[in-house]
Amino acid sequence: MPVQVLMPALSPTMTEGTLAKWHKKVGDDVQSGDVIAEIETDKATMEVEAVEEGKLGKILVEEGTEGVAVNTLIALILEEDEDESALEGVDASPKSEAKPSKSAEQPSEPSPQPKQQAALQQASGSNDGNRIKASPLAKRMAEQAGLDLGQISGSGPNGRIVKSDIEAALSGGQPKAAAQAAPQAAAPASQPAARAPSATVPAVMGEGSFTDEPVSSMRKVIAERLTESKQTIPHFYLTVECEIDALLAMRKDLNDRAPKGDGAYKLSVNDFVVRATALAMRKVPTVNASWQGDFIRKFHRVDISVAVATKSGLITPVVKDADNKGLAEISAEVKDLAARAQEGKLLPEEYQGGGFTISNMGMYDVKEFAAIINPPQSAIMAVSTGAQQPVVKDGALAIATVMNCTLSADHRVVDGAVGAEFMAAFKKLIEEPLTMLL
Amino acid sequence: MSESSFDLIVIGAGPGGYVTAIRASQLGMKTAVIEREHLGGICLNWGCIPTKALLRTSEIYHNIQRADDFGIKVKDFSFDIKKVIERSRGVAKQLSDGVAYLLKKNKVTVIDGAGKLASKGKVTVEKDGKKVGDFEAKHIILATGARARALPGLEPDGKLIWTYKEAMVPDMFPKSLLVIGSGAIGIEFASFYRTLGADVTVVEVMDRVLPVEDEEISGLAHKAFEKQGMTILTKTEVKALKKGKNNVTATIAANGKSEEKTFDRVILAVGIVGNVEDIGLENTKIKVEKTHVVTDEWSQTNEPGVYAIGDLTGPPWLAHKASHEGVICVEKIAGVKDVHPLKTGRIPGCTYCLPQVASVGLTEAKAKELGRKIRVGRFPFMGNGKAIALGEPEGLIKTVFDAETGELLGAHMIGAEVTELIQGYAVAMTLETTEAELMHTVYPHPTLSEMMHEAVLDAYDRTIHF
């Protein structure tokens, strides 16, 4: 039997992806570990490696095909002793195992559910809105805890919700993916996400030609999530003006001291912003939390998402445990994450999670802006350009480099005064950068 | 020779090894299993299977002894120990041949010899001092099992001081027998020999027999054994064994006092040690703790590409645990979806003595220790129609539930046929039942299994038949 190559699930919530590129053609030899294709998802592009050895016998999904469901049969690899005749009669319906098992211990599953596994998720569960599959114990535990089964995904057989899923939902957070996934299609269980095709496009008015560009999966997710954020989160905004001359001087000083080669670093203003934010979050931990309806989840670790603009859209890799990292470490990590984000090569655990986001548009000369909160976080900091401005010092005009920072906060979690307290702490650290050593 | 390269090599063809090899083959992996002695391992050849054959003989003998209760007159009856043993050996051989057939049917290559890790991905095999060959595989599973543990001063000699092996092929039927250790192995032999008429003394260093079972069950077992005429000495140690010509004198100590007693034979049943020697662990990162290989929830050792299952690893040391560990291990390797690590708390344990003992999950004491608020249900065999009709009125079925969620935390039984009944509770636990589903399940009447229903009802003060 030729070996079946199935569309892999590259993240717990991936349901479909684009088969971007084939690296092998029919007839090519395939060794275990060879990259045979590239899959593009809403977040990143990843390589698919061959597990088996043999010859690529047949490609069933062409390069560039979008919307390929997870577990779809995409190719067949002929084993050592097989030839093309082995390809005939291989039915294209994917099986849940590499080889069909003779002893059908389970009643044959229809196409295996391309859904999530263990990890704590807020995504709409394995349930198609009708029957929710859960063990009797899980049902009772959910009832007792007031949890909505529709919001929990199941790790049991066929996506069944079991005791451990309820326990995970109650205890909050698994060791690996700290807190929730950030940019996930968190569609409420009652209605499937707006994947409904063609809303009626109003007749275009006026003359002029136009181009309709198909929406990439990444753009779809950005649209969904940020719309949901603006519609459901009561945003309020706080701006502080930070004088960053001392910070710039310290930055120059530290950068001048950087060794060459091993241990080299080049600090940017944003690195200081990340550290100051992390320390301010320690001082005012209320902003490091998430609104969960019946309760507010307070995160124990300070994980900061750093917004990175890539050619395909916005992505937020996470600097974990940021309050325990020094400037050089933060700098190296952000550079590495940003570079890989640009290439679409981030691993899911690198962009999931995070309790707070920083969006820095300083390099674009933006004077002030307010960002949109990334649910399930409760706040986001918009950092603008530092520019020379007239300021008043001791009653006289002086010149200082001023950088505006605007906090957008979720008023369900962060009250005005708390937000102001946080920004005050942040501003103090930025204006007196030496205190970041404490 | 291309027949030396595999996807998976399993070292050891006991219930862990051969089941794993067959599953791997089902999943499309080119598999070889290396066995140095006999297919089926200890379980099939010198453990589970032959002992159950022996215990069947003693069970029948026991029933013949009370045939009069059932209105049957039996004048003369006796047992021929040689034939008893012969039957058990025949059963073992039949099953071992069966394993050979299954491996062949599933196209698993069987290599005769002792396998040893040579280097990364390579196994070398020797037989009778000569090299059989070198084999390679991306994944290697160690399933070499375990053997009887000896204690200082209490070493088996294969003649007068027996381990389980000699105990199942005795050179003579002992008139008096000392069994050291009251775990499943010790108790099963004690029960076998006592039922057939030997004078049996069981010495246990803990404060109760069958110490892993629920306390209440241990207590009932103790009473039952004493009623059968066994001498049970708990909180007692055997300090020394002195061999005579055809007997052994043991120094038995308790409460600071010690005395000497002589027995025809002694059975050492004080635990097992993993077979970690001579399998090439030295040059690997594999960690061994207290004679067992350390593994994670997927049976991986510290050496990438090398796994370990069964008695070679941690407890419980049961054949079905080994089999499931191995299956999960290869399913994970093969990338099967929805694979979860084994939940050891849902593995049932059975002891086939008279009366039988079976359990799954937490004991009452352990549940309390973990801080759970519990509800306990009990039902005695005395209240069950079938039990009385069978002439088996002694026994108890006990359930332990979480008082808040109704989760079945544990079930413990003692009495006729309970080893066959326990699966019902094991299935219930896997399906994550609450008491409600068990109460709604219709158990057939008249059966012993109805007690399982009543024991659930009793936990909620709703029992009908007692």
Image: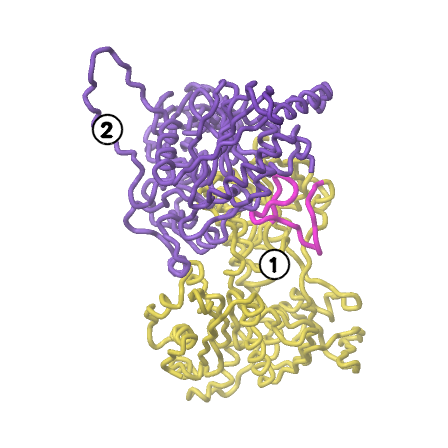
Query: Mainly helix, strand or loop, the magenta region?
Result: loop
Q: Locate residue A408 relative to residue B283 in the image: left or right.
A: left
Residue at 68% across, 73% down: B206
Q: Locate residue A167 relative to residue B219 in the image: left or right.
A: left
The residue indicated by pointer 1 is B315
What type is the residue that disc 1 sits on? Pro
Bounds of the magenta span? B284-308
CB of mark 1 within 8 Å of CB of mark 2?
Answer: no
Circle 2 chain: A
Residue B261: % across, % down? 76, 81
Q: Residue furthest front?
A: A395
Q: Locate residue A202 relative to residue B342 in the image: left or right.
A: left
Residue B231: % across, % down? 66, 82
Circle 1 chain: B
Q: Locate residue A28 relative to residue A227 in the image: left or right.
A: right
Residue at 45% across, 63% down: B426
What type is the residue that disc 2 sits on? Ser
The residue indicated by pointer 2 is A198
Camera-near label (1 vs 2) is 2
Of the chain colours in the picture, the one used for chain A is: purple
Q: Residues within 10 Å of mark 2 (few under 14, many from 20)?
A: few
Q: Chain letter for yellow? A: B
Q: CA distance from mark 1 to mark 2?
A: 59 Å
Q: Is residue B293 magenta?
A: yes
Q: Is residue B1 magenta?
A: no
Which quadrant of the structure image shows residue A409? top left
